[in-house]
Amino acid sequence: MTGYSAIGLVNTKIEANVGGVLRACTCYKVSLVIIQGQRYKRLSSDTTAATRQIPLIQTSDILESIPFDCVPVCVEITEGSRSLFTFQHPKRAIYIFGPEDGSIPKSILEKCQLIVKIPTAYCMNLAATANVILYDRMLKASKNES
């Protein structure tokens, strides 16, 4: 799959989770990370120094920071969300994740045409969820290249 992936984090809270997401971004060659909100301030959890390799933008409006022609994909367990099992990843996608103690705000969900969920019995940890989404993208891309 040509194109790129980016990660968007909305109002994240727990430093270790952001560090885990940044590590996943390094592992799966994510091109950009955008963080909306001011709850997360420190990068001491960035153990792979991802921000030296991947641009990180902090913003007050994640949707305004999405690159041109990049498709926002909200990752959320909500009515109408598509199962990751059958989801086809856009070539240029930013995967938007909500806070650990809440959901992606309705104002963002309403502006995103694609909402995907990992069909689990219970919600997953933020960093684990990012890893699963990015792994699924890589796996499906490799199958399409075969």
Image (cartoon, rainbow, N blue to C red):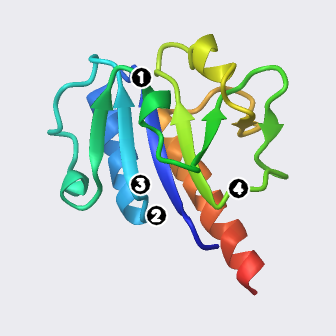
Q: Earlier in the sequence, mark 2 or mark 4?
A: 2
Return the x and y of residue 126 as percentages of the image width and height. 48, 34
* Circle 3/circle 2 CB separation < 8 Å: yes
3 or 4: tag closer to the N-terminus: 3
Dot 1: element: loop
Dot 2: within a 10 Å radius of its alpha carbon, few (fewer than 14), some, or many (20 or more) residues? Answer: some
Q: Secondary structure at mark 4?
A: loop
Q: Amino acid at mark 3?
A: Ala
Q: What is the spatial separation of the Cα atoms under label 1 and label 2, in whole angstroms?
A: 25 Å
Q: Nearer the viewer, mark 1 or mark 2?
A: 1
Which of the two marks, 3 or 4, is nearer to us in this view? 4
Disc 2 marks a residue whose amino acid type is Tyr
Viewer-side residue, 59 vs 16: 59
Residue on which the image places disc 4 = 89
Q: Residue at x 60, y 13 (%)?
A: 107
Measured from the top left, where is residue 24 in percent x and y? 41, 54
Quickly name the residue at label 2. Answer: 28
Check residue 24 in the rendering and tell me which mark sits there, or answer none: 3
Residue count near mark 4 (Cα–Cα under 10 Å), binned few <14, some 14–19, many ≥20: many
Residue kind at label 4, given as amino acid type: His
Q: In this view of the protein, can residue 135 be seen by the observer?
A: yes
Residue 132 shows up from this direction:
no
Of pointers 4 and 1, the one earlier in the residue sequence: 1
The residue to which callout 1 is attached is 61
The quadrant of the picture occupied by the C terminus is bottom right
